[in-house]
Image (cartoon, rainbow, N blue to C red):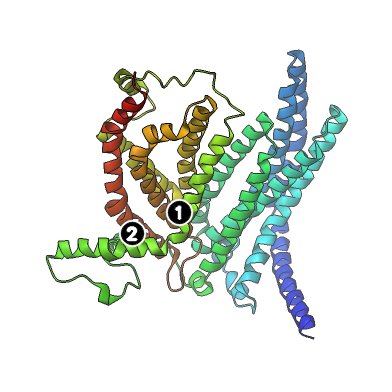
Amino acid sequence: MATDDVVRVRRSSLGLVWTIARRELRDTMRDWRIVTPIVILTLIFPWLMNWTAQLAMDFVQRHDAPLIGERLIPFLLMVVGFFPVTFSLIIGLETFVGEKERRSIEPLLSMPITDLELYLGKMLSATALPLFGSLLGIAVYLTGLVLSIGYLPPPQLLLQIVLLTASTAVMMVAGAVVVSSQTTSVRSANLLASFIIVPTALLMQGESIIMFWGYYDALWAILAALVLITLILVRTGIRAFNREEILGREIDELNLRRSLRLLGRGFLQPPAGLPAGEAPAAGPPVLRWLVRVYRHDLPCLLRRNRVPLAAVALFVLVAAVLGWSLVDDYPLPPGSLALGDLSRQDFDSLSNVSFLPSLTTGGLLAHNVRVLLLAAVLAVISLGVLPILLLMVPMALVGFIVGQVAAQGMDPLTFLAAFVAPHGLLEIPAAVLATAFALRVGASVTAPPPGMTVGEHLLATAADLIKVFVFLVLPLLCLAAFVEANVTPEVVLWIYGG
């Protein structure tokens, strides 16, 4: 009996979702400004890409380079599927703020449905028509390829492109619905849409590079990342969705003074929930504040952020192992790592390498601070993903070089002790700390706690990041830069010097 009730509730919920989606689709199909471009991109654009594929195949065959044409055709297939999908962004941006401007949102928000049902109905309606046009365009393009040059991509690659197209459409709609529910005008929503379309375009460029190199298995990892980002965006939209706020908000206002006041309050005051009895004893105000920061604030923040700290440390380890695993695939020539006769002139010559910082305390410190601050800024627009990637790249390089040292018959532990350990024991923990708190800043927009807006939660986590960076990360980076500039070269020369 209870099972039957649950089934009826689920069917009722799905029925409400479909009712909202059907209403939205009916309104969309009436708008010729949306339907006409989708039809053109579905029927005419695949023919244009088919003509381009024929020209490309004829050109590469004349120059005896058929591999280029074979790699180009799947890329054109992805382009054919991508352009109709972009209209899902336009429809998604209209979901809430467009109806508010047309004064048709009040009856919708007053319906006896849950926020999840309303959200899913809006997302389904915004995704269905562009995705159908995208898949139809792919089918038209494939039909033209088979009839013109007799080419059909491998089934796995075709499945990957279809799934990537569908995942990209849903991800863009999820982001657009979040933007639409948090803005007050279509104009502001369109401006914020650049934060969706630009990363998506960059993702397409990355996918095209993978296709041209033929690393098709890597597309599964991108697909998994798209699904994860989509789930995060849906969760963000549902957590930040507020019917009363949508109806009551009349204008988007950037109150810079209030934002700076909240940021300063979060920096100066102890973390929320710190027991009052742990306050330090009397003394000069500045000294009393510094004592409280080091004795209570920082330990409290580190305890509360155990999960992001452990996650970043795990990613560092994975990056080092991944770098080592590439040694067999990309071996260096024997004798290329000549470490047996190093001199001080070898360290001085590093200053001539344009992309490396100068081997001085100030140069190394400025470089490390600049990279970590850039990672913190990128965390806001990438949900915390880019800071982790920026940290994993140098750690993978370290693992790769250590693996090459071992492959050429030298002791990797000695290499680590000489080149990495002196300053790495300070620099790596500092980078992990900064990246973990940057990850928390990026993730803060996805799940604001009850009673806080997305902006307030973002400012609170940014204040924690600044506090940890100033009082913990920066001192570690200063010591690490001094050791790297003055101690590490002496250790290397003592072990490997001729």
Q: Dot 2: what SS?
A: helix
| Residue in the picture at 28% in, 63% down | 261
Between residue 359 and residue 108, name the one nearer to us: 359
Q: In which quarter of the image is the C terminus?
A: top left
Note whether residue 359 is visible.
no
**Of 77 and 281, the residue lying toward us:** 281
Q: What residue type is labelled 1?
A: Leu
Residue 92's spot in the image, x, y percent?
61, 57
Image quarter in which the N terminus is found: bottom right
Does the CB distance between marks 2 and 1 fall below 8 Å?
no
Is the residue marked by circle 1 packed among few (<14), some (14-19), or many (20+) residues within 10 Å?
Answer: many
Image point (30%, 18%), residue name:
345
Mark before the other along the chain sequence, 2 or 1: 1
**What's the mark number on residue 439?**
1
Residue 390 makes an appearance in the image:
yes
Residue highlighted by disc 2: 463
| Percent x, y of residue 105 | 59, 70
